[in-house]
Amino acid sequence: MKLKKLESCLQQVDTFETPKVLLEQYPTSPHIAACMLYTIHSTFNDIEGKLVADLGCGCGILSIGAAVLEAGFCIGFDIDNEALEIFRRNAEEFEISNLDFVQCDISSLELEAYSSKFDTVIMNPPFGTKRNQGIDMIFLKTALKLANNAVYSLHKTSTREHIQKKAHDWGVTMEVIAELRYDIPASFKFHKKKSVDIQVDFIRFSKL
């Protein structure tokens, strides 16, 4: 599947109806999701036929994209039941059977049950606002526990040095695949601008 076709496909995925600020529920745009998945699939061959986990899956755009690219199976993990209900409806709309989801808190996931069970982990984790400081690293550490091969994730470019240090401490290699502009539309009352561009890194982590 070509990149443009994948992006067009993902434009049909419904997103949050009432996003929750505490969960940093900002949707992954079809463009960014398609670029991430297409790269993971075509450059690294880490989707087709693989067991894939999507942490903080929300309404399922990355999971559905992975399933469309013929992942062996994809499982989304999210804490929010309302988001997962949209995920379920999206999966039904796409008539996709090679995916499922688990409702759970990523920060208290029973890691032993899922340790090294997934070939690939994909995620757009919360960036970690003042209320959620450090949640991005909790997601990343969990993802690295679940993956037996590679983790693909988005992180604010401003945190790159911190993440590089953590990756070194954890004994994993880190490669910034691309620098992207993440357009966050005004979603909450406190947002003063129609949208804000945040510089983000698309990163691949792999175990040494």
Image (cartoon, rainbow, N blue to C red):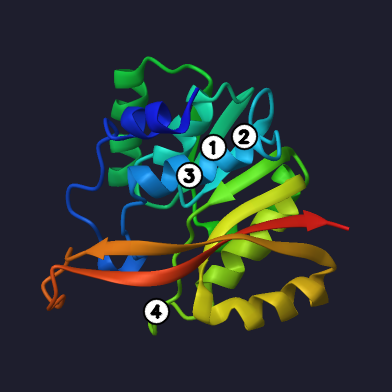
Q: Amino acid type of disc 2? A: His
Q: Could you tell me which secondary element the residue under label 4 belongs to? A: loop
Which image quadrant is residue 31 in? top left
Left or right placement of residue 140 versus residue 192 in this view: right
* Mark carried by residue 157: none
Query: Do labels 3 and 2 touch, CB within 8 Å?
Result: no
Label 3, label 4: how far apart the Cα atoms are: 25 Å
Q: Could you tell me which secondary element the residue under label 1 belongs to? A: helix
Q: Could you tell me which secondary element the residue under label 3 belongs to? A: helix
Residue 103 appears in the rendering: no
Left or right placement of residue 68 versus residue 189 in this view: right
**Image point 39% across, 79% down: which residue?**
129
Identify the residue position indicated by label 3 in the image.
35
**Image point 57% across, 57% down: which residue?**
153
* Mark carried by residue 41: 2
Of the two numbered discs 3 and 4 on the same chain, state the one appearing first in sequence: 3
| Residue sitting at the far right | 208
Residue 75 appears in the rendering: yes
* Mark carried by residue 129: 4
Q: Amino acid type of disc 1? A: Tyr
Task: Please provide percent x and percent y for residue 12.
Answer: 26, 30
Query: Do labels 1 and 2 touch, CB within 8 Å?
Result: yes
Query: Do labels 1 and 3 touch, CB within 8 Å?
Result: yes
